[in-house]
Image (cartoon, rainbow, N blue to C red):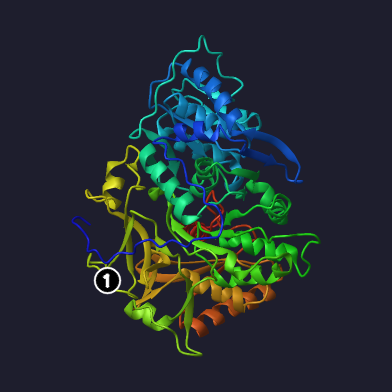
Amino acid sequence: MGGDLPSSMIHSNETMIDAKRVAASRASTLIGALREAAATGEGFRFYSGKGEALETLSYADLEREATAIAHRLMALGLQRGARVAILAETDGDFPRAFFACRLAGLVPAPMPLPAAFGGRDTYLAHLRRMVEAAGASAAIGPQSLADWLVDAVAGLDLAYAGTLEGLPVAGGQGELPEARPDDLSYLQFSSGSTRFPVGVAVTERALMANLRAIVDHGLQVVEGDRCVSWLPFYHDMGLVGFLLAPLAGRLSVDYLATRDFARRPLLWLDLISRHRATISYAPSFGYDLCVRRAGAQVPAGLDLSSWRVAGIGGDMIRPQVLSAFADRFASAGFGHDRFVPSYGMAETTLALSFAPLGQPLRTENLDSRALETQGRAVAALPDAPSRTFVSCGRVLPDHEIAVLSESGEPLGERMVGRLLARGPSMMEGYFRDQASTQAVLSPDGWLDTGDLGYRVDGEIVVTGRAKDLIIVNGRNIWPQDLELTAEAEVPGLRAGDVAAFSLDRGGEERVVAMVECRLSDETARADFAQAVEKALRTRHGLEVHVALVRPHTLPQTSSGKLSRTKARELYRRMLDEAAQPAA
């Protein structure tokens, strides 16, 4: 990965819009941006699962209250740069704690909530590992999880574990440390790994560079913009995209907890409608959930005409889902030209590219065989096996993306390879994990994203994760292809019901589709499994072993994405248990 890469990279493009533009903060640190935002009347508002306003927190109040909490944190005797684990509940205490840490010269490490885990003990063990990986000196959580937090960190050498309210009263109002651009701003833990947790270390300099790029070039913020979000604060898209970027752009945000969105997804759209919001993001599954919950009837009075940036990120983009959403909510004023596909990851702070605003999705319908056997992205002929991908637009200013072969050679347009990125938003590294850092980050700043994709007309198209790729007899098969085929062609399957992966079992490479089944009759279950096998054999020429599991069995990451890695491990355990002799 070392050495300079050629200059045939993707460079940024800017789509102007007819409104007065708002520039992002030029402050060198997040605290500087907070002080600028505090001079406005903007801020955060939090809503219940019934759509009722629970709390309003202006940026001015946030600065004042976080400053008071910062003094109380300093009373713990923590050294500058010490890490503080924060359970990321969707309420005003999370930004209070986060900014209090930065004001006190401490490094916040947002931690996930229990919803995505398989029970209390599993969650507590995972949380403990993350606190240890952060080398945290303190841990803060909401009152509702205070007992769980204390149990999770029992025996660890922490100066404090509890709620904000329980922090010691400051003995005085000493001077707070001055933030510096090269300071660590926060640790962002990956949501999907089964390995020991590692934290992405993001500096103030990298954060501010990415926030400026997002506000000025990606979203092209204008006067009157307002955001709505249900994305969790422990995920990079929720934290950076909808907590820190709005603050840098001095925008107001209305928040709905992720668990409340899952129960009532149309409440997300209702908040957009009520507050004339203009910017909101979701992975594809969020849009799909709204379509399924709405059914054939769009709620009366719903008005989405103000929504100019309907962003998609955080997972592979599913154009069929987006098209169905636009069609279903067209009567509410939503148009196909509102979608803004984006590409990025925690290791790049957040964003790397945005599709042009105000334009329909740019899709690529590709010949599956050329893609699988030659790594070439060529247009499919009518009636030929094909796969549709969505362009994620041009790379942000001052950033670069390169496409390389497995041997590290630069590839030309429409050739699929590994995506590497470089620019001012790159992480400093994985916290206290030099080996993992060196595996993905070169000395000259190139990050191996772990993704596959190709260039076309200056834009980037992402085709999948390299680690998820299934290789059979020289064919490169994307698991999403198998999953989409099953969900589209087998009655009774919904989006997210299938996880496809390969498994080496005793020297035999097996392609597996783990499928959630809602049938109880054994004959019907057998017929259902055969229907999945037949669909995959017919469309993809593959023999796929179908493993039926109960609904809600397929594992997800803490941000709600399907985890094929965890599904593979679950399947492996199922095989091991089946091989055990009966007691």
x%, y% of residue 516? 61, 65
**How many residues crowd mark 1 within 10 Å: few (<14), some (14–19), many (20+)?**
some
x%, y% of residue 343? 44, 59
Q: Residue furthest right?
A: 300
**Left or right: 292 as drawn, with respect to 197:** right
Name the residue nearer the viewer: 277 or 563.
277
Q: In the figure, 427 relative to 344: above or below? A: above
x%, y% of residue 532? 58, 77
Q: Image point 22% across, 57% down: which residue? A: 1
**Left or right: 549 as drawn, with respect to 192:** right
Q: Residue furthest left?
A: 3
x%, y% of residue 291? 69, 65
Residue flagged by tag 1: what amino acid is it? Leu
Q: In the figure, 172 relative to 47: above or below? A: above
**Residue underneath mark 1:** 411
Q: Image point 43% across, 27% down: which residue? A: 106
Name the residue nearer the viewer: 548 or 439.
439
Observer able to see residue 108: no
Name the residue nearer the viewer: 81 or 440.
81
Q: Residue furthest bottom?
A: 382
The quarter of the displayed image where residue 332 is located: bottom right
User: Mark 1 falls on what kind of element?
Assistant: loop
